[in-house]
Image (cartoon, rainbow, N blue to C red):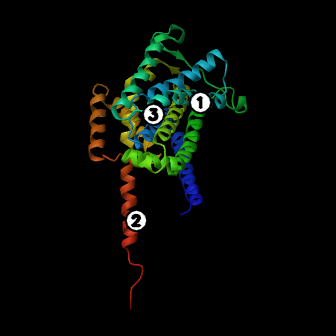
Amino acid sequence: MNKTNITLKQGMIALVITVAALIVGFGLPSWQFLITVALAKGLVALGVVLLLRSGLASFGQGLYYCIGAYGVGMAMNYLDWREAVILLPFAAACAALLAWVLGFLLARYRDIFFAMLSLALSMIMYGLLVRNPSLGGSDGFNVHAPSFMWGAFAETLSRPGVFVLTVVLVGFVLWAMQGFLRSRAGRLGPAIKDNEIRVEYLGASAYRNIHLSYVLAAALAGLGGALSSLSIGHVDPELAFWTTSGEFIFIAVLGGTRNAYAPFLGALSLELIRTLAYQYAPNTWQIVMGVSMLALIVFLPGGLISILNRRNAAATSNDSSSPTGARS
């Protein structure tokens, strides 16, 4: 299968997922908020997957999630920007720019040193926001509803509008990131994880590739933070706290790291289990959620996406073993 056919196939898969999400959202309106938040977190987890594929665990993606959310809120309050078409790229660009600067330092480190440095940077941001009364301190501040296409559709984007915007954007990101994972830069990640020295001997730069992955992961986190702030309507320093970053790591592990779809499957599963546990076991929902997550990790160490991979592998095996003809 050539590259064009693969690109078209991935585009069709992304389109089907987008349409299916829209149908579910409008068929079950009460689920729109859950799906929106889950997809926003899935964007951040997708960035975590990019780094995990290179053998790096970032415990500081909450930094860029927070940058994206606060970037949207501050642009609305201080620059009087209301247009979602401008706010979302602005949030992603702010996160990517900061990651580009910090990446010159972080891309030099590996293993626990990378994890701890990323965590330290995120906690520095948390401390700065908590002690900044002009941004609401520990309480944060509210984010107003944006407009879309300069009021061509509506003066302000309602919650269903934010839902549609999020689903469509995620569909596009899925298609684009699947293409990136199949590109030379995307394939270098697992190679760096396996043997970084061999990658250098082959003429590729592990440092540059990790720097690129770090910037892309930050841009995805910034976009996720922006969408989350528009959906929730509020931002606070907890977005940069270590528990938030840990949740993104958990989502990435829960979904798997094989492709771009896995983090969103993990995010939707986590939000669904959390919601149902809180609804039906309000006094012990943390225990129910913890046991459910533990069971998933123990019995599906490759992540939820491994279920689909097993089915595909079984189907391929059956096709290859079936007789194509018989001799007379």
Question: Are the residues flagged by discs 3 and 2 in contact, CB closer than 8 Å?
Answer: no
* Percent position of residue 20, x then y: 52, 47
Which amino acid does the dot numbered 3 rest on?
Ala
Closer to the observer: label 3 or label 1? 3
Q: Residue at x 53, y 52 (%)?
A: 13
Camera sees residue 258: no
Q: Quadrant of residue 226?
A: top right
Callout in the foreground (3, 2): 3
Kindly give the residue lying farthest to the top in the view shown: 133
Cα separation between marks 2 and 1? 42 Å
In-front residue for pair 219/263: 219
Density class for disc 2 (Cα within 10 Å; few <14, some 14-19, many ≥20) is few
Name the residue beneath numbered marker 2. 316
Location of mark 1 (residue):
93
Residue at 40% in and 49% down: 198
Residue count near mark 1 (Cα–Cα under 10 Å), binned few <14, some 14–19, many ≥20 = many
Residue 303 left/right relative to 186: left
SS at circle 2: helix
In what element is the residue under mark 1? helix
Q: Which residue is mark 3?
A: 107
- Which circle's residue, 3 or 1, is located before the other in the chain? 1
Please give the name of the residue rendered at 62% of the width and 31% of the height, measured from the top-left corner: 89
Question: Which residue is painted at 41% across and 82% down in the image?
Answer: 325
Q: Is residue 76 visible?
A: yes
Please identify, in this view, whether the residue under mark 2 or under mark 1 is nearer the observer: 1
**Secondary structure under badge 3?**
loop
**Please, is residue 304 above or below residue 270 in the view?**
below
Q: CA distance from mark 3 to mark 2?
A: 39 Å
